[in-house]
Image: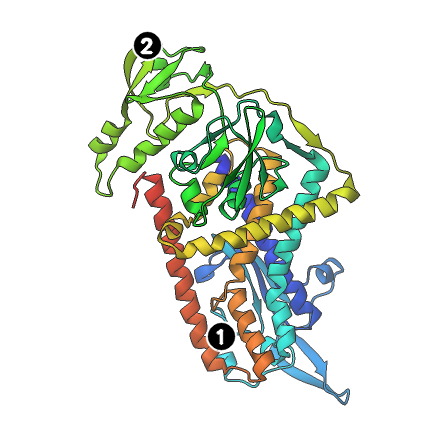
């Protein structure tokens, strides 16, 4: 429930800001905004809505039913449209939000309106460059939001990390990494000659594009040449290419867990799992997380139960145990007490640092999009269930804001995709018009809009299907 609440809170904030970007841009160019909704109000089901010019109501004034505009000669003409201000509301379907902009050809437009002559206050009557800015308003707001959040997080909490030189246990490498020349205990200090200031999974992305990685081994520096055909997805799934090495040090046992049922105690040593040697906590985690991948697509409950039954060698004695439904043993491992380096920022110094952090996250995410078009990358696409799972199970404000900032970047990039019905699709058409000076017909826009809408629905179904398969531990 805590994870779900964090997702709803983050999405509600980002949706309001994203749609607010479109709203402000539309108002700047005097385009009417008929609706502003958090979440979708499909079938006219809604929690709250009001036709509001809130400030005027607070002043005791009601918005006029009929609006008047002036022509080029200054003569007042009636627009013939009953406009009572923007309708603000909250829908019931928490999959997004929207602003209904007058004269914009989208899934919410009244087709009868298309048959009428374009009006001065309508989106379709504005120059292409103005329409482009209106469509990019939400994406720009997303990126600004991410930069602001990152800056404020650095200002409040600073930047805490472990320098590679302080990781006395070194790093743990996969079989593929060892084949490339790495050894357990190596410490990565440089990637293509650039010093690694702090270790994170983003370093794996840098390694996938690197030619040389420098490690500290037995007190001496050693350069390792990286293969040319590195693929980041293969470096993180099914086993991390490199990660922080954590000794196996049982600290406490979870009550009612499988670990308690076999009498596991703090300080005990686990030597093997199903006959596979265990030298550290990384080995144990890798073995347990790989068990669901042994299940086939048509696996039944009995097959899952069989996979959960494992044999451990504890203090030289073999013990059989059944793991939890999520393949956990049920104990807390004590983490190494490394030196923590913390950089503190004031309000002014946090701004460039936050923008730099946000820009690096943006570039990294865009770089990773190339993997979506591979078979393995397509399987990694996640939907709402997958997004929920990235939030911690206990409320952590710093983690919440960092994830919200990252999701703001994701939302911005995804909306930039050149798919009709997304901001990027509208932007492409506007750019095409600016270049060719030929405006697509409203009929054409209507057709591509529905094509894009069905494409988005298909992508959402596909992402949710991936989530369900991962939740059921089914490896496709």
Give the residue drawn at x 61%, y 71%. Answer: 132
For residue 44, side relative to residue 435 (left or right): left
Q: Is residue 382 above or below residue 79?
A: above
Residue 309, quarter of the rendered image: top left
Task: Give the total number of marks visible in the rendering.
Answer: 2
Select label 1 or label 2 by which is in front: 2
Question: Which structural element holds mark 2?
Answer: loop
Whole-angstrom CA distance, mark 1 to mark 2, is 74 Å
Identify residue for label 2: 316
Is the residue 424 above or below the residue 406 in the image? Answer: below
Left or right: 145, with 330 as reference point: right
User: For the residue labelled by badge 1, is the local secondary structure a helix, a strand or a loop?
Assistant: loop
Residue 401 position within the rendered picture, expressed as x and y whole percent measured from the top left: 61, 41
- Residue sitting at 28 percent across and 21 percent down? 275
- Residue at 63% x, 30% y is 163
Examine the image and state in which quarter residue 325 appears: top left
The residue that label 1 is drawn on is 110
Residue 414 image label:
none
Location of residue 395 (image quadrant): top right
Let me know if residue 430 appears in the view. Answer: yes
Colouring rule applied to residues: rainbow
Tell me if residue 45 comes above or below residue 292 in the rendering. below
In the rendering, at what x and y percent does residue 266 appear?
45, 11
Q: Provide residue 181's location: percent of width, then percent of height.
A: 45, 35
Name of the residue lying farthest toward the bottom:
73
Residue 47 visible in rendering: no
Counting residues from the N terminus, which is met first, the one under dot 1 or under dot 2? 1
For label 1, count other residues whose C-alpha is less than 10 Å away and answer few (under 14), some (14-19) or many (20+). Answer: few
Q: Are marks 1 and 2 in contact (CB under 8 Å)?
A: no
């Amino acid at each position: 429930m805590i994870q779900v609440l964090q997702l709803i809170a983050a999405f509600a904030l980002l949706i309001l800001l994203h749609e607010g970007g479109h709203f402000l841009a539309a108002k700047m160019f005097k385009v009417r905004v008929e609706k502003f909704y958090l979440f979708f109000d499909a079938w006219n089901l809604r929690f709250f809505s009001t036709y509001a010019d809130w400030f005027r109501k607070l002043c005791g004034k009601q918005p006029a039913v009929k609006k008047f505009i002036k022509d080029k000669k200054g003569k007042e003409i009636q627009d013939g449209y009953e406009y009572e201000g923007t309708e603000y509301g909250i829908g019931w379907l928490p999959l997004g939000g929207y602003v209904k902009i007058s004269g914009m050809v989208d899934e919410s437009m009244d087709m009868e309106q298309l048959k009428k002559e374009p009006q001065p206050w309508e989106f379709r009557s504005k120059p292409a460059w103005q329409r482009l800015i209106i469509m990019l308003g939400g994406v720009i707001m997303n990126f600004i939001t991410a930069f602001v959040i990152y800056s404020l997080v650095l200002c409040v909490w600073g930047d805490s990390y472990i320098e590679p030189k302080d990781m006395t246990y070194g790093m743990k490498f996969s079989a593929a990494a060892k084949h490339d020349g790495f050894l357990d205990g190596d410490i990565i200090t440089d990637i293509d000659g650039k010093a690694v200031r702090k270790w994170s999974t983003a370093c794996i992305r840098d390694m996938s594009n690197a030619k040389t990685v420098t490690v500290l081994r037995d007190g001496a520096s050693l350069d390792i040449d990286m293969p040319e055909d590195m693929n980041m997805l293969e470096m993180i799934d099914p086993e991390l290419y490199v990660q922080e090495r954590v000794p196996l040090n049982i600290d406490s046992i979870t009550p009612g867990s499988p670990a308690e049922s076999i009498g596991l105690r703090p300080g005990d040593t686990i030597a093997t799992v199903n006959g596979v040697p265990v030298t550290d906590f990384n080995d144990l985690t890798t073995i347990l997380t790989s068990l669901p991948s042994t299940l086939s697509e048509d696996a039944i409950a009995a097959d899952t139960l069989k996979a959960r039954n494992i044999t451990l060698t504890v203090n030289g004695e073999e013990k059989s145990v059944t793991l939890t439904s999520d393949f956990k043993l049920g104990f807390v491992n004590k983490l190494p007490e490394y030196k923590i380096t913390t950089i503190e920022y004031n309000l002014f110094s946090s701004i460039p640092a936050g923008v730099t952090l946000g820009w690096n996250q943006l570039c990294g995410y865009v770089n990773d999009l190339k993997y979506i078009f591979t078979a393995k990358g397509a399987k990694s696409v996640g939907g709402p269930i997958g997004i929920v799972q990235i939030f911690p199970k206990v409320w952590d404000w710093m983690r919440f804001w960092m994830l919200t900032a990252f999701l703001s970047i994701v939302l911005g990039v995804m909306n930039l995709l050149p798919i009709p019905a997304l901001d990027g699709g509208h932007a492409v058409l506007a750019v095409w018009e600016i270049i060719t000076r030929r405006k697509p017909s409203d009929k054409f826009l209507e057709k591509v809009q529905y094509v894009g809408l069905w494409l988005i629905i298909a992508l959402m179904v596909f992402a949710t299907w991936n989530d369900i398969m991962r939740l059921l531990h089914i490896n496709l």
